[in-house]
Image (cartoon, rainbow, N blue to C red):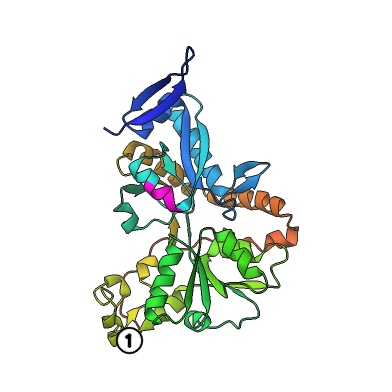
Amino acid sequence: MRAFVDDKPSGWSDAVETKAFTNAYSRIKTTKELQFLVSDSKEQGIFKFLYDGKFSGLEIDLATIVAEELGSHFGGKIKPSPRPIPWTDLLASIADHRSNADMGISTISKRHYREEDGVSFSEPYYCTSQSLVFRLDQPEGSIIDMIRGKRVGYQAKTTSENIVIHLEKATNSGFRKVPYSEDAQMVDALARGNSPVDLIVTDTPFAISAVYQKGRREKIGYKKFSRGELKRLTISKDACLMIPRWADDPHRAVGSKGECLIIPNNEWAEAYAIAVHENEQELLNVINAVIAKIKKDENMLGLVSKAVDRYAKVKGLTDQEKGQLHPLFQSEACEHPNSEVLD
């Protein structure tokens, strides 16, 4: 049994009353509160931002719907309570329950290797890709050509960092890595003159939000990692054999001449999902039911639209500027393609 501790001051003294719960589901039922972890970054595009002094955005709305569904199960209102935490601690805090939180939602990409660390993921609620964000005084070309010899920024401990590591191995350290703790920090750095980075790798929604903020459209642009280019992004058989475990990775989609993919095809999609402890099946069932209903009723587009409206208001965007966020409404495939022989 995993103990969930609920501490409340006693009405008679400063002593602490301690209650233990068998799981998050029972804790929520008793306390009437859904505690969920979010990144402590002030902003994550339309997914989380400050609105009227409170957290708002697509993921806050989704967590609120989960709380409402739990309330219908328990016959009462459940309070959704976001708790900010450093991104680097978020998944570990869910896995060992050090934070006493019930779930985590913070543009977390569903990956099998993350599930090996004690967490389980819901079905994806939003799927996207990675992009390069670059200054417009830099010519646009292939991904490899654009990063060669450059300073490449990324948020540490994210799937963007994995992409950068793959590219580094394949280009024999042909560029310099520049890690950041927050996405907004590196975008601000890139947009400034005399920037410490030449371009950044980040999730496409963050790239879109970054580019179309006021005063930036004339300075920076973005290039999505399209599946067509990722399929062509290969290295030779000899080079592949020189990198440990690459040639044996089925997701490298080894080609007819022995060449292999630089970025494995099971990392082509960013499928955002809600994270819970690996033993929280009851809570996970409720979360998946909420996501399935939203998809079935095609309500995700409405949730995105509301989040974009609030985000545009916070950023002071005109209707025309808000219209440039339209790509955020476009769904991308969540699944990765099967391994196949390259052309």
Return the x and y of residue 219 as percentages of the image width and height: 68, 73
Main SS, magenta residues: helix
Q: What residue sits 38% from the left and 23% below the top? A: 18
Count numbered badges in the picture.
1
Residue 112: x %, y % from top left? 32, 57
Q: Looking at the image, which residue sits at the far left? A: 248
Q: Is residue 40 left or right of residue 239?
A: right
Vertical arrangement, residue 107 with respect to residue 103, above or below = below
In depth, the one of 113 and 194 nearer the eye is 194
Describe the element under mark 1 as helix, strand or loop: loop
Location of mark 1 (residue): 236
Q: At x 58% / y 72%, what residue is drawn?
A: 196
Image height of 122 relative to 194, above or below: above
Q: Quadrant of the N terminus?
A: top left
In the rendered view, would you say 284 is above or below 202? above
Residue occupying the far front of the picture: 14
Does residue 74 show up magenta in the picture? no
Query: Does the magenta run of residues contain 89?
Result: yes
